Amino acid sequence: DVKVTQSSRYLVKRTGEKVFLECVQDMDHENMFWYRQDPGLGLRLIYFSYDVKMKEKGDIPEGYSVSREKKERFSLILESASTNQTSMYLCASTVNSNQPQHFGDGTRLSIL
Amino acid sequence: LAKTTQPISMDSYEGQEVNITCSHNNIATNDYITWYQQFPSQGPRFIIQGYKTKVTNEVASLFIPADRKSSTLSLPRVSLSDTAVYYCLVGGMDTGRRALTFGSGTRLQVQP
């Protein structure tokens, strides 16, 4: 069974801090994704990656960057955290474009 | 951007069949239709995927009419544990970012 692991379930940071959210998948999937989920807004795509060192902007990339140095690991970076980035962050992976995504359990991030 | 439309919420009772319909009027030829289930504090979980006609697995059925402009997720004999949010997703990564846009989902509440 595919396992997508996010490094933290809950995280509290301060405004202006640089924040790293880590995601690891164990099925050698090519594609990895970062979403944020807010009440009433569903899941919104921040960035995705279809190969090592490759990345594409999603719908809401502003204020975020990503890193994919190894196939199994996809990191989301908040360069200077702000209170409006308080949210649930979800990582997912998939083997190819038409296969279902496998999600981690999310990181609930609070920026104070 | 292409868009999916689902009811915001539905109520049912244990043992009943539940049908959730998703509209996707501008589905593209190569698009697949995928449904996910999400419980509180967890990532979405894949339920079923289809391209046309009918697909059935151990937990659900997916009905897709010939014009593919809508799809219906059918959950037979629901139980309390089926209370969750259900998302319809259309497309695949090769069709661009629109394919990775989750709507707000349908919140299903199953009563005893």
Image (cartoon, coloured by chain):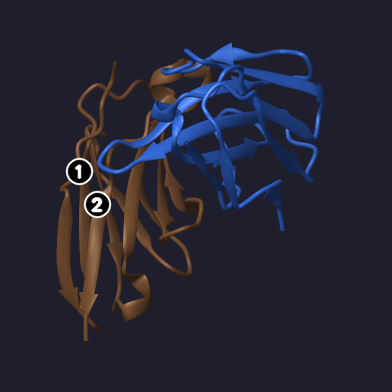
Chain colours: A blue, B brown
Q: Amino acid at mark 2?
A: Thr
2 and 1 marks in contact (CB < 8 Å): yes
From the top left corner, tell me how far across and down residue A27 is, in percent: 78, 44
From the top left corner, tell me how far across and down residue B65 is, in percent: 23, 42
From the top left corner, tell me how far across and down residue B45 is, in percent: 50, 54
Q: Nearer the viewer, residue A101 or B77?
A: A101
Left or right: residue B37 versus residue A109 is left
From the top left corner, tell me how far across and down residue B88 is, in percent: 33, 43
Left or right: residue A25 versus residue B29 is right
**Label 2's element?**
strand
**Label 1's element?**
loop
Q: Give the residue pinned by disc 1.
A: B6
Q: Give the residue pinned by disc 2.
A: B106
> Residue under mark 1: which chain is it in?
B
Left or right: residue B16 versus residue A45 is left
Residue at image position (28%, 20%) is: B2
Q: Amino acid at mark 1?
A: Gln
Q: Nearer the viewer, residue B25 or B98?
A: B98
Q: Nearer the viewer, residue A88 or B20?
A: A88
Q: Residues within 10 Å of mark 1 (few under 14, many from 20)?
A: some
Question: From what the image shows, is residue B111 above or below residue A81?
Answer: below
Question: Which corner quadrant of the image does residue A14 belong to?
Answer: top right
Distance between the alpha carbons at the discs numbered 2 and 1: 6 Å
In the image, which disc is placed on residue B53?
Answer: none
Question: From what the image shows, is residue B14 above or below residue A20?
Answer: below
Question: From what the image shows, is residue B97 above or below residue A28?
Answer: above
- Res. B31 in view: no
> Residue under mark 2: which chain is it in?
B
Q: Quadrant of the N terminus of chain B?
A: top left
